[in-house]
Each structure stands twice: as C-alpha cells, then as structure tokens.
Amino acid sequence: MISLDVLVVGLTGQTGAGKSTVSKVFSENGFAVINADLISRQVVVKGSPCLGELVEIFGEGILNPDKTLARKTLGNIVFSDKTKLEMLNTTIYPYITSEILKEIKQYSDSGKKLVLLDAPTLFESHADDFCEIIISVLADEKLREERIINRDGLTKKQANDRMNSQLDAEYFASRSDYVIENNDTLEAVSSISKEVSDKIKYYYYHIRTAEMSVQ
C-alpha cells in the first residue's frame, strides 16, 4: 500500500523520445527517481525465478553461454512478434511491479515525498494505476529512429521494430497530464522539464498537502 503522503509521478513515452533527459531534470529538482528499466534488468539476473520462466517460454536460446540473459536475442524474438511480446510482458511485469512498490515504500519510509517513476511501459504494465500524475515524452518518428540507432547500435529495421511495438503518440497524449515534446535542443527540453517539475512541486506542497490536512 502506497502512503497517502507520497506523490508518485509516472514518466513514460516513446522509445527514443528522450525520457532520460527529463528524468535527470526531475532528479536535480528534488524528486526521488525509480528507473523501471534498471529494475527490468535486475529481475532477470542469472538464476532468478523470472529468467527461469522466460527460458521455459522461449527456450535456452535466449541465454548467453554463461547462462545470463541474451537481451538482444530476446529482443529480436519479441519485437517482431506481438504475441511473443505479450508473453514476455505477462511474465515479467508482475516481478517489475513488485520491485517498484518496494522502492516506493523505501523512499516513503526514508522521508521522500516526491517520487518519479521512469517507466517506458507504464501503461502496458498498469503501473499508471499507482501514479497520481502522468507525463509523456514524445518526439518525431525520424528523430527517434536516429536516436535509437545511435544509442543502442541497432539496424534501421531493429529500431523500427521497437518503435512499432509501442503504443502510438495519441495514446500517450490522451492519458497524460503533461506532454513534453522533445524535438528541439537539450536546453529547450530541460527548461520545459524544469517548469513541469516546479508546477508539480507547487501542487504537492501548496494544494495537495493542504487538502490532506483537512481530511
């Protein structure tokens, strides 16, 4: 159960849109950050129950010789097949959600009241259920493609498979309280992110806290 005095903000968006830049600004502005990508790696470490389930589904071929997860191999399997992607998600999301809730509680217990959950699959995993405010980061398709290829060393087809496996921009925008478009300079998106984080801090400390005090 999430404490009522903790504000969880969900940060999501399209791959290659630049969520990491926004997340960094929020961190610098006093938000505790939970990185769902890091958690997704932690739950599939060598010998983990989650990795064992994935091997049962996709076979030993998704493992490296040292029995760790061959992430690119698994990615090539699931990002070109929506049914297999759904099988992956159904298996891994409960493990990720459990760890996210643990981290939120740990931050709450330590006195942190503003938590940013950076999760690319926020909606798919239903982690938006415990977020009070949702922010989506979007960017033009061509720009995202270039960023993904440069960032992850993928081919154009691999980059597009990952992009096409995601929800579309309209889906993100229609379910978000704030939309940050990252088609400009680093300075521009950082400025917008700071403005949004300031607004959320003001809401928490001057509106939400006052509402809780009279309940």
Image (cartoon, rainbow, N blue to C red):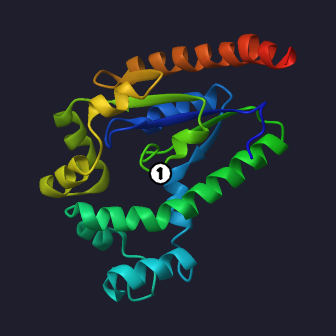
In the figure, is residue 188 to the left or right of 115?
left
Residue drawn at (46%, 21%) of the image:
178
In the rendered image, the vertical position of residue 202 relative to residue 6, given as above or below: above
Can you tell which quarter of the image residue 132 is in? top right
Return the x and y of residue 150 as percentages of the image width and height. Answer: 25, 48
Can you tell which quarter of the image residue 39 is in? bottom right
In the figure, is residue 50 to the left or right of 56?
right
Can you tell which quarter of the image residue 9 is in? top right
SS label for mark 1: loop
Residue drawn at (53%, 80%) of the image:
46
In the figure, is residue 155 to the left or right of 117?
left
Q: Quadrant of the C terminus?
A: top right
Residue drawn at (56%, 79%) of the image:
49
User: Does the rendering let one see residue 162?
Assistant: yes
Q: How many marks?
A: 1
- Of residues 12 and 65, the one nearer the viewer is 12
Return the x and y of residue 58 as percentages of the image width and height. Answer: 33, 80
Residue drawn at (42%, 30%) of the image:
136
Return the x and y of residue 208 as percentages of the image width and height. Answer: 73, 17
In the figure, is residue 19 to the left or right of 102?
left
Which residue occupies the extreme left position in the image?
A: 157
- Of residues 24 and 212, the one nearer the viewer is 212
- Of residues 57 and 61, the one nearer the viewer is 57
In the rendered image, the vertical position of residue 155 relative to residue 195, given as above or below: below
Return the x and y of residue 206 as percentages of the image width and height. Answer: 74, 10
Look at mark 1 in the image and give the residue it sits on. 125
